[in-house]
Image (tube, grey):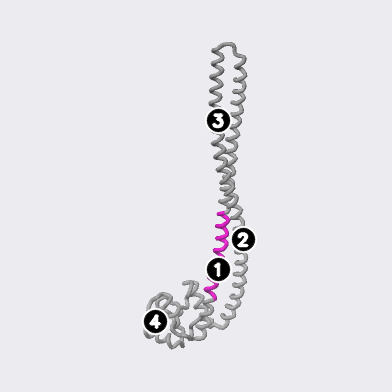
Amino acid sequence: MDENLKVLLTVQSIDMRFDEVRREKQETPQEIERLKEDLDLLKNAMEQGLSALEELKEGRRKVERELEEIELKLKKSKSRLDEVKSNREYQAVLKEIEELKGLTFQKEEVVIKWMEEIEIQEKECADNNIRWRESQREFKNKEKDFSQRMRELDREVESINEKRIQLSQKTDKDLLRRYIGLRTHLGGRVVAPVVNAVCEGCHLGIPPQQYNELIKGDSVQTCPHCNRIIYWGDDSRTEGL
């Protein structure tokens, strides 16, 4: 295999790693943002739950105040029984007492219902609070991990960039420009092996005469279909490149 092509294959492996690092560096902040959005949604749910709980408690307090007023009226009505002078008035007070007792029972039933709903809502709020705290800890841990990973990627970029510069200086300038142009146009792998007379870049067959030239390995060839730079992929000397 042509020595310039060997170096170019190493340059390509570096560039493809660059692509992977760039994608990861783009996806990491997006992942952090998604986690932050999930955390904000959970916080909103917790706040809404607390607000609903306070509304329930206020509703219970309102009914309890109404119940106190009814009990006060009931107490006054009972005290009037000793003051009435006619049977008709006595029966009227008794009727009023019975109505107030019925109303008291209804209000007490409402209070019990409010208390049951409050208990359910308090349980939900407690669960939300636990989930919020756990999610907050998880977010901080992941944020720390992501920050560390970003620093690792930055160091890797710096290292492989230095290696690429050194390799680029050893590569034929025209071949390197051609390679860069292909990467700009096609992206990804632009130096592709030919295996069993098929270009692994576009998966189309190479003409027999050109395939024979590839086997000789004394010239740089281009795929007639996709214009990628190609080499003989069955050559054991290319393993690991």
Residue 107, which numbered label?
Answer: 3
Whether the magenta-drawn stretch holds residue 187 is answered as: no
Regarding mark 3 in the picture, which secondary structure is present there?
helix
- Tell me the CA gap for discs 1 and 4: 34 Å
3 and 4 marks in contact (CB < 8 Å): no
Q: Give the CA distance from mark 2 to mark 4.
A: 50 Å
In the foreground, 39 or 102: 102
Q: Amino acid at mark 4?
A: Asn
Establish if 228 lies above or below 76: below
| Cα–Cα gap, marks 2 and 3 | 50 Å
Q: Which residue is mark 4?
A: 196
The residue carrying mark 2 is: 141
- The residue drawn where x is 54% and y is 26% is 103
Seen at 62% across and 57% down, the residue is 137
Q: First in sequence, mark 3 or 4: give its number.
A: 3
At horizontal 61% and vertical 53% (from top left) the residue drawn is: 133
* Label 3: how many Cα within 10 Å (few below 14, some 14–19, many 20+): some
**Which amino acid type is shown beneath numbered disc 1?**
Arg
Which residue corresponds to mark 1? 22
Question: In terms of secondary structure, where does tag 2 sit?
Answer: helix
Viewer-proximal residue among 208 and 121: 121
- Residue 206 is labelled as none
